Amino acid sequence: MRILEFLNDSKDDIEASGLIYECGLAPMYHRVFTTEEQQYIESRQEDFPFTRGEYIASRLGEHDMISDLALFSQRFRANMEERFIAARLKSVGAQFLIEAGDWYALHLFIQEIIRDSDNLRAHLPAAREFTKECCEKHIRYTHQIRQELPAGTVQGEHLGYWVMSHLLEEETNYDRALHYAEQGMHQGWQGNWEPRIKHLQKLAPPRSTQSTIVNLSGGRPPGSGQRPTPPPSASQAPMLETAERHVACTQCGQKMRIPSTFTRAFGACVKCGNRVDIPQD
């Protein structure tokens, strides 16, 4: 069963369409690939190991679809362009896992995609941008992934942080590269973080101001050894009040206030460690 035929055939099936279309599989497929690429992919699916009947019989288990997408993508190995198509084909499955809320499966699957695309980026400029998109997606859902790690599972590597750090270093964006390396180590992901951070600290511009955002509650960030900032004196209060800014983490919703002395363009959320962009106005 070809992918487009499967998607079209599922429109009249309430159960199938409810999962496939609400999870955005069809729109994702059409958005990721050009018309020419879709035709090329379709021409290679005569023995696609996946039928609608088997899919429905498996109670619409998203893992079956992911496995079949991964198996099918292995056929695209003749050249760099084909391998890039294969990585993007897997990304359709990653979007399915995001919409289904299967965070641990997403963690494992998107790391596989990052490895595939990272091996291509030296040869294909588009693969480099795709790698960054995958890393950003991996980082964006880190909070959910950590909460869904199976009991007893060792918190292994996180390629989103690791590869993004290297990509930003290549772009000479050393400060952001250092931020992601520090975040990866702070959250406990495995990796050779310490020498990487020391290397980036030599390249990054000096941090002349405090780099931790202050919690609105006035408490210290978890694990911080710094003392809470003392309240301003009465003479200072009006000036600080007008200069102070507020921001909320886009990942966990934690509300924070930004001290007037904080001049960097971004910082780390005090609750989940996610990168937070700081408004400059």
Image: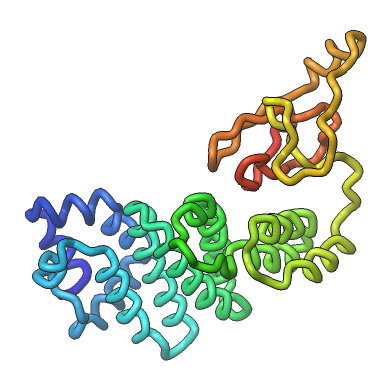
Q: Is residue 20 toward the left or the right of residue 280 in the image? A: left
- Residue 163 visible somewhere in the drawing: no
Q: Residue at x 75, y 35 (%)?
A: 220
Give percent across and percent down for residue 211. 80, 43
**Residue ID at (34%, 86%):** 75
The residue located at (15%, 62%) in the rendering is: 59
**98 relative position to 167: left or right:** left
Q: In the rendering, at what x and y percent does residue 93 appear?
A: 35, 65
Total numbered labels: 0
Query: Quarter of the image holding residue 72?
Result: bottom left
Residue 70 horizontal/vertical position (percent): 35, 77
Q: Could you say which quadrant of the image residue 27 lies in? A: bottom left
Task: Using residue 246 as the reference point, say whether residue 67 is left or right of it.
Answer: left
Q: Residue furthest bottom?
A: 78
Type of colouring: rainbow
Between 32 and 23, the residue placed more toward the observer is 23
65 in relation to 281, above or below: below
Is residue 129 in view from this perspective?
yes
Say which residue appears at 38% left-offset and 70% top-offset: 90
Most extreme residue toward the front is 152
Whether 165 is drawn above or below 147: the answer is below
Does residue 262 lie above or below 1 as drawn?
Answer: above
Q: Quadrant of the N terminus?
A: bottom left
Q: Nearer the viewer, residue 36 or 72?
A: 72
Q: Is residue 8 left or right of residue 105?
A: left
The quadrant of the image that shows the C terminus is: top right
